[in-house]
Image (tube, coloured by chain):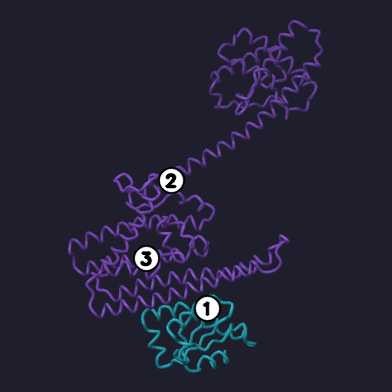
Amino acid sequence: MDKVMRLASENGLVLFSKSSCCLCYAVKILFQEIRVTPTVHELDQDPEGREMESALSRLGYSPPVPAVFIGGKLVGSTNEVMSLHLSGGLIPLLKPNHSMLN
Amino acid sequence: MLFFSSSLYISMYCLLPDFKLSNAYNFNLTCTKAASIISSRSMDFPSTLFVPSRTMGTYEPIHQIGLWGENFKSIGSPNISPSVIFDVANKLENESETTSHELLAPSSKYDQEASKPFDKIQRRLAQNREAARKSRLRKKAYVQQLENSRLKLIQLEQELERARQQCLYAGGAIEVGHLGISGALNSGITAFEMEYERWMEEQNKQICDLRSALNAQISDIELHILVESGMSHYLELFRMKSSVAKADVFYVMSGTWKTSAERFFSWIGGFRPSELLKVLVPQIDPLTDHQILEVCNLKQSCQQAEDALSQGMEKLRETVSATLASGQMGQGTYLPQVAMAMEKLEALVNFVNQADHLRKETLQQMSYILTTRQAARGLLALGEYIQRLQALSTVWANRPHGPAKLTVENVR
């Protein structure tokens, strides 16, 4: 959990993902579409991936990935990101905090 | 199990209209004699166990058996139980004329050639009995099968009729060909289809209410209630879909419960949110500048979210395909690949849920942007659009072979 929180509190947009997860891929595409670049941590490519995954599941999202943090704060999983985007709240949230704009 | 079939055969002939009672006595004699021979040779076989059946439709009524039974009693047959009950359920029609005639023959032979050895007659009787017994069993099985099929057919016809009635009543054009038939295999699907029928009825009713309300210029407060009902009605549909997606996600993906034209426009198990907006927005003019901007932003976000999900779906297809195609082909083995693909496929449920979530969010965002009256017009437009799609499906299905003609007959 420590590693997760440490990584998550890095500034900007942080995405916990798995390279095999297609829903994570969809979220990545969405960020591409709105021209933001998240910091992506692929759990299946991280030596501590297992622990990180169980830490993320304790956050209450099933499946545990994708998990999105903005400015150190948990936004949620795909549902929350989509809702936020449709309500027009995603981009303003990213503007002061974005890591990189294409 | 040994039947006293000879008595049976003869009893049948007692029942034929042209049978003379005078002959009954001779036959009885034969029967009794045959019976005593048989029973003396096989003491451990039970005596007559026949059940009269109600299906002896083509024959004389039962009292004639009784009569014959009386005759039996009068000769005081020791070996045949007075309570003669016949199992003629599936046997009567099957008895061949020749078989019975062969049995009749022994009686006359009996009279004329008393010296003929009983063995020969015995054997023939036994053979006949065996053949008849086999025939009866086959016939019974066949009739049972027919009965089952008949019941199933009646059931299906009733379902079809019910569905048609709903269809006509609702004024929609739900194709009934697929309803309820494949669903029987999966109770989650059956439950959903039944719920969806009711949902559609309610939907059409709400459309009518909205139409009359908007024409009647009712107050915003009352209109708000209708809008809220409409919104929660859609939420109900998404809840239903979520439930059936757990049971069978492919069912939701294929949109089986919808009409063909609706399916044509289907995107991950439902309508495409951006298309929804394209249909709605022209119907809710005029919009304020602020509203136009918000709707524009919503359209864009919608499109982006759709693209993201579509590409995710494409990735899922590639992954499943690659998994299935992995390893050596040509050996006829596939279990490991199928098992791996199964795991990948579980993500499909998530995609369907995400797509429905997007649809839900789109509707809700629109309801925030629009005034009550605009929202009412929007819901009405959406409902009518779906009805048009359903009508299109019906007309298409009923089109004559040639250019489609829109006549009153083929638009229900």
| Residue picked out by circle 2 | B160
Q: Residue at x 33, y 68 (%)?
A: B231
Colour of chain B in the rendered structure image: purple
The secondary structure type at the circle numbered 3 is: helix
Q: Nearer the viewer, mark 3 or mark 1?
A: 1
**On the image, which quarter does residue B385 sit in?**
bottom left
| Total labels drawn | 3
Return the residue nearer the eye: B221 or A24.
A24
Residue located 65% across and 18% down the image:
B97
x and y, in percent, of residue B291 in the image: 26, 78
Q: Residues within 10 Å of mark 3 (few under 14, many from 20)?
A: some
Q: Position of A7 compared to B4: left or right?
A: left
Residue, disc 3: B234
Nearest the viewer among B112 and B27 is B112
Q: Residues within 10 Å of mark 1 (few under 14, many from 20)?
A: many
Q: Nearer the viewer, residue B393 or B382?
A: B393
Mark 2 and mark 1 on one chain: no
Kind of residue sitting beneath label 2: Leu
Residue A75 at x, y = what percent?
45, 85
Quarter of the image containing the N terminus of chain B? top right
Task: Give the CA distance from mark 2 to mark 1.
Answer: 44 Å
The picture quadrant where one finds residue B240 is: bottom left
Q: Colour of chain A?
A: cyan
Mark 2 chain: B
Say whether mark 1 and mark 3 are on the same chain.
no
Name the chain letter of the residue that bears numbered label 1. Answer: A
Q: Chain of mark 3?
A: B
Q: Which mark is residue A25?
A: 1
